[in-house]
Image (cartoon, rainbow, N blue to C red):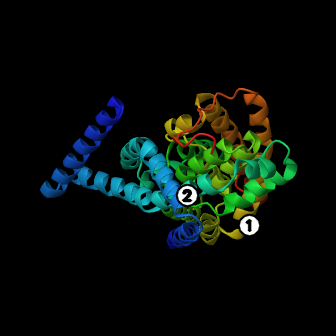
Amino acid sequence: MKKKDIVLYAVTAAFLIFALVSVIIGFEPGKSLLKNFWEYIKFILTIMPAVFLLIGLFNVWVKKETVIKHMGHNSGIKGYLLAIILAFAVVGGLFAALPISKQLYDKGSRLGVVMTYLGASCVCRVPMTLFEASLLGWEFTAIRFLVSLPLIILSSIFIEKVMGKNPGIPVSVSDLPKGK
Amino acid sequence: MTVIYISCAVLYIVSLIASPKKTWKAAKSGIKMLLKILPQFIVIILVMTFVLYIFPPEKIVDLLSRSGDWVNMFVASIIGSIVVIPGFIAFPLAGILKDIGVGFAVLASFTTTLMLVGVLTYPLEKQYYGAKLAVVRNVSSYVIAIVVSIVVGLFMGGLF
C-alpha cells in the first residue's frame, strides 16, 4: 500500500470516529456530515462493484481488433454514433463513465470517440433523463439534448486535434496480462 | 440499480459457461481496477461531504434566486462545475428552483455544468487521462454548458 493511501485511510477513519461521536453526543454538524458521507458511500458501494465487474468481462472477452474496427481511427461517423448509443446505457455518472471510457481507449478506440462517449454519458444517460424530463419538462430536455450532443462531438474532434499524437495519457489503471 | 446487477449476473453466467478460466480473470481484473481507484473515490467523497455541508441545497436555492438571470446563469455554472451532486438530489433541487421562478437558462447552466464539468473530480480524471486532457475536456465542457444555457434561454425565456 502506498504511503498516500495510508494517510487517506487514517483521515477517513478519523472522520468516521468524529462522525460517530457526534451521533452519540448529538452534535448536529457532525450528524449531517455523516448523513452526506453515507449517501455518497452508499452510491459508490452499490453501483461500482457491478460496473467494474462488467468492465472486467469486457476486458477479457472483447478483442482489441473489434474495438479498433468499430471505434478506431477508420471507424468514421459510425464510431461517434456507437459511442453515443453506448453512452445512453451508462449508470453511475462520471465515476463509472471514466473507467469505462478508459477501457475503450486502451482497447484502441480513437480519442475523439472516447471523449464523445464520456461527454454523452454525462448528459444523456437514460434513467437520469427520464427523471429530469419529469421534473423540468420535455421541452427543456429536448433542447438540452439537441444542442449538447452535436457540440460534444465537435469538441471531441477538437480535443483529439489539440492533444495530438502524444496525448500523455497514463498507460492503464489496470495491471492486466500483456497483450490482452 | 437492479438492472445493472441482473445484467451483470446474466453475463457472468454466460461467460462461466463459455470459459470458467476467462471469467475468473475478468472478475479478478475488474476487482483489481476498482481497488486501485478506490482511494481516489474516497478522497472525492470526503471532500464532497464537506462541500455539501457548507453548500446545502437550501443555500444553493438562495444563491440562485437573487440577482438577474445572466448573473444567476454564471453563478449557477460555477456552482455546477464545482460540486458533484447525485441526480437524486440535483434534479429535485432544479425542480424547486423552477417552482420558485428561476429561469430555464439558469437551470440548464446548473444541471449541464453539474453533469459535464467536474472540478472536484479532477484528480480522478487526471489519474485516468493525465492532466492536460482533463483540463482541456473540462474547459471545453464548460463552454458547451454555457452555449446550451443560452440556447435554452433563447427558446424558453429567461435571458432575453
The residue that appears at 30% across and 51% down in the rendered structure is A33
Element marked by disc 1? helix
Relative horizontal placement of residue B89, taking residue A163 as reference (left or right)? left
Image quarter in which the N terminus of chain A is found = top left
Up the image or down, B117 lies above or below A124; here it is above
Up the image or down, A164 lies above or below B102; here it is above
Mark 1 surroundings: few (<14), some (14-19) or many (≥20) residues within 10 A: few
Q: Inspect this view and state whether residue B52 appears.
A: yes
Q: What residue type is labelled 1?
A: Glu
Comparing A99 with B113, the one in front is A99
Comparing A143 with B75, the one in front is A143
Comparing B28 with B35, the one in front is B28
User: Which residue does the numbered mark 1 point to in the structure image?
Assistant: A139
Tag nearer the camera, 2 or 1 = 2
Relative horizontal placement of residue A65, taking residue B11 as reference (left or right)? right
Mark 2 surroundings: few (<14), some (14-19) or many (≥20) residues within 10 A: some
Q: What residue type is labelled 2?
A: Lys
User: Which residue does the numbered mark 2 point to in the structure image?
Assistant: B22
Q: Mark 2 lies on which chain?
A: B
Comparing A62 with A159, the one in front is A62
Relative horizontal placement of residue B127, taking residue A121 as reference (left or right)? left
Quarter of the view holding residue B98: bottom right
Quarter of the view holding residue A115: top right
Element marked by disc 2? helix
| Image location (x, y in percent) of residue A65 | 75, 48
Q: Which chain carries label 1?
A: A
The residue that appears at 55% across and 43% down in the rendered structure is A177
